[in-house]
Amino acid sequence: MKRLLRSDGFDVIVVGSGLAGLSAALTVAEFGYSPVILEKACEPGGLTRRAYGFFNAADARRQIALGIDDSPEKHLRQALEVSRGKAREPLMRTLCYEAYSTLQWLEALGLEFEPGIRRVLGGVYPRTHMPLRGAGEAYLSALRSALRPFGVPIVCNAEVTALRKSGDAVTGVEGLLSGEPFRLTSRLGVVLAGGGFSRNMEMMRLYAPGLSDVLPALDEGADGSLIQAAADIGAALVGMSYFEVRLFASTLGLPGDPSDYILVNARGERFMREDRRRSTLAEAVVRQPDGMAWMVINAPGAEPLRPTTAFRETVIATISGYNDCIRTKERDSLGRDPLTMRPIGPGVEIRPVLPRILWSYGGLEINEKAEVIDRRGRPMKGLAAAGDITGGIHGEHALMGDMLASAAVFGRIAARTLVKNGRAVKRKD
């Protein structure tokens, strides 16, 4: 591998081996060019290995048979609303209108999806596709299998620390391979498809000080190093204060049905309707004393709470007020509809609830061609990006199923852009 990285025989360098990176590399290979994939971790896959596997696409072939009236335009309008108006519409439009052709591409590679279609939490239309076997790993397996006949190398333990330029064009990378320096040059450019930055405490304190004490993402690749390397040569950043934050009780997420529990703060008082969006609840918990909350959940057979502390005494009063609203069929002080509530107690458990960052929505600014934009608003020659490292696509929040779709869609676009631009340069020569 060390000899491999002394070679200058690659057309495109892809940094990152999750869904975005593998999609980019395979697309380059399908055009007849030679990519190499560099992965910082000791195994490929990135955050995709932990993904649920949901992939959103308006799919007339499946949906019409089920009586579902959907379209890319409806997908676009809903996604823009969920983004809280912060998504870049041209990017989101590209995602929604290219999602189905990308789904078909994955199917042609041998990735099998369930014959039906799902509606996931927060989805207005059933448009979510799920692999028949496996979750995120199913995408990785299909793409790695498709890459094998092309002989595309995936080099692990290869940490990219800087981007190299010749004139105004990005032409390669430098970094450490198992701790030893390397340099690699490409003919057409570089695709950045690494992680976000939620594990980089310095960047968190700079861009999102209110979340700097929240548990960071599980993805170890979310260290912000590639974002910083691109910023060092002039790349623009966007949406750096936007994150997906979820609540976890112990190692588990909140129960799917919010009728069986209430959330209280350190004073034992409810502070938000439990049936709000998970991201909204998580943001509310971050603002509570000590940045945490407690879930009071029905536990049949458990002993009734006793007022042994001031906290428990308040929790008992909170439960009583909550149950009174159910009995009188009146909305509670937080506006929750009693028809969506079930009595709490007498037997309950109290579990600590902590927010955790799942991923960042901000990162490198790109255009619809997946070209990285510099701080003057111009595309950077020879540099494209896709996946978690980018910002602006989803705004403040994404529909479940849009993240994987985005990674694959823009991974393919990034590859096509570098190949097309490289051909144009050759024609001029």
Image (spheres, rainbow, N blue to C red):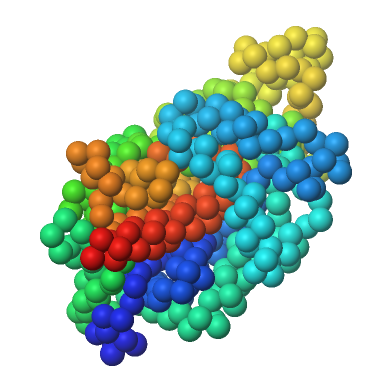
Q: Residue at x 35, y 69 (%)?
A: 12
Residue at left offset 76%, top offset 17%: 338
Q: Is residue 311 above or below residue 223?
A: above
Residue 233 in percent (x, y) is at 17, 54
Residue 421 location in percent, x, y?
34, 58
Left or right: where 10 falls relative to 62:
left
Q: Which of 134 and 378 lies nearest the eye of the viewer?
A: 378
Q: x%, y% of residue 365?
A: 33, 43
Determine whether, in the image, residue 424 is placed left or right of residue 28: left
Quadrant of the frame with the C terminus: bottom left
Which quadrant of the figure has residue 428? bottom left
The vertical placement of 198 against 318, above or below, is below
Pick the front one: 356 or 129:
129
Q: Quadrant of the N terminus?
A: bottom left
- Furthest toward the bottom, the residue is 3
Q: Is residue 338 left or right of residue 210?
A: right
For the question of whether residue 312 can be seen, the reply is no
For the image, the number of numbered tags is: 0
Locate residue 226: give its quadrant.
bottom left
Residue at image point 80% right, 48% down = 62
The answer to whether residue 370 is seen in the rendering is yes
Task: Give the residue drawn at x 24%, y 42%.
Answer: 378
| Image x and y of residue 82, in percent | 55, 30
